[in-house]
Amino acid sequence: MNALRKHVIQPILDCWSLLVGLKITGKYFCKPLITVHYPRQVIDSENLSTYGGHVELIGMPKDPATPKCISCMMCVTNCPSNCLKVVKSKAPTPTPEQEQAWKEAEERGEKVVKPKAPKFPAKFMYDYTLCSLCGTCIDNCPANTLRFSSNIYWVATSRKEMHIDLLARLREQAAEVSAPAPKPEARPAAAQKEA
Amino acid sequence: MNEFIQNLIPLVIAVVGSMAWLAVNALVLVYCERKFAGHIQRRPGPFEVGPHGVLQTLIDGLKLMGKQLLTPDNADRFLYWLAPILSMIPVLLLFMPIPYGPVLTGMEVDLGLLLILAFSSFNGLALILAGWGSNNKWGVLGAARAVAQTVAYEIPLLLTVLAIAFMTGTLNLTEITAQQAGHIGNWFIWKQPLAFLVFLVAMFGETNRAPFDLAEAESELTAGFHTEYSSMGFGLFFMAEYGYMVVICSICSVLFLGGFHGPIPGIEGWWWMLIKTYALLFLMIWARWTFPRVRFDQLLNINWKWLLPLATFNLLATALIMKL
Ligand code: SF4
Ligand code: SF4
């Protein structure tokens, strides 16, 4: 019985599976194309949302030009490719008058509140040429301020251009949001598909 | 003398026609293959050159011709360059005895089937010369692989063809077509279903098509016997492969699908032959983009453990039935 199964039934089932395979590819053959012809069409935002481009910062809800980053260095420590560089902000250097005032206050026995260093980083550099897009930085960020961008049409002609200043990028994005977005020249793919 | 010339003229026309037919087919099939692959993967395929990329293969061909012809160091020059030519020339001959229509037959040969089988074996020789002449270990290994495959798959192919020959009592392809005249029920696919299946599978193996394309596997393995070939050296092998595909699909439609006879009596003509051949060709392309490549031992196992016994059984059964 076992031999019958092994030598007769199984091969027939195997052959049947070949036909099933043909059916599947045949079905896909008949389905509409999903590739976007890039220069004529652009990717619609729905598809862009699933695209994982380089890492970028997320701004505060109220102040989109400032990141939610708390300079904890978790992303830098966890990045396997060592492509992030965060420089903590320093407390503002006090002017001589301020210093004088603090000294006097301390002598009087009052409690002095010196301005603390701001939490957001002074510098946030990112080397896209090294990044493996593993997402470890995103997962480890306690402040949830990192994400993959949907920056799909970005090209650079040299390695240097791939070293991105993420803070500057965030400021640019914030400025873009406040200004009306320029109309894209090519129509989105979805619109063209319907036409 | 006069008669000689009278015989010669159609032959020359047939040869030129075959050449044109081969070139057109190669262009069209490469385009179709890429489009088909594209659509299965839901992308457009060639798109930029000409409307929907129809001129793409033509341009690719021109590019291929413009490339430099290189002979590897210490290669056997003669064998090295003989191989692609040897692969290409017999294909032209193979088109001769195939009846494409009631009058559209290059050359009436009584032993047409035998001629095709004999000359298609030249391909094996071409492959081994290519591998051997290249002075490249991958070339030699690839050639060994390719020859092991083509020789192995030729046997079941021969046996199924033999079964048809037993049944019809002739090797003349025109005669075989004639015996299938009338309606669809007369086609030999109904009388020889097993032979048809074996032929279909052996067809893939014989033409080095996926899933049996271990002889080449251009993109993944080192390309095998044509590793060293550049430009039109490779181009000729490539064209020959498509030529063999067309030939074997034409033979399949002549042997099993009634050749140029239509499914209902009365309508017949070369277009039927064309439709059937192209349907088979599309099946081959379809299969290529569906199935993963088999391993080499699996490839040989399929042949020796399944196709060969089945073909032998079929032949013996045919002989028995014919005798009774
Ligand atoms: S995605 Fe991975 S490699 Fe890239 S910056 Fe984040 S942790 Fe580093
Ligand atoms: S981006 Fe996130 S993980 Fe990195 S320093 Fe800022 S808060 Fe910490």
Image: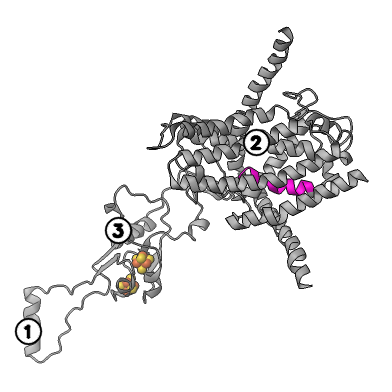
Task: Give the chain of mark 1.
Answer: A
Mark 1, other Cα within 10 Å: few <14 / some 14–19 / many ≥20 = some
Q: Which residue position holds label 3?
A: A164
Q: Which residues are magenta?
A: B195-209
* Kind of residue at disc 1: Lys
Q: Is residue A74 above or below residue A188?
A: below
Identify the residue position indicated by label 2 in the image: B120
What is the C-alpha distance between the residues marked 1 and 2? 102 Å
Q: Can you tell which of label 3 and label 2 is closer to the viewer?
A: 2
Q: Which residue is mark 1?
A: A103
Q: Please tell me in which quarter of the rendered image ligand 1 is found.
A: bottom left
Q: Quadrant of residue B277?
A: top right
Residues at discs 3 and 2 in contact (Cβ within 8 Å): no
- Name the front one of labels 1 and 3: 3
Q: Is residue A10 placed above or below A101 in the rendered structure?
A: above
Q: Residue at x 74, y 62 (%)?
A: A13
Q: How much space separates mark 1 and mark 3, taking CA atoms?
A: 42 Å
Please provide percent x and percent y for residue B259. Answer: 79, 34
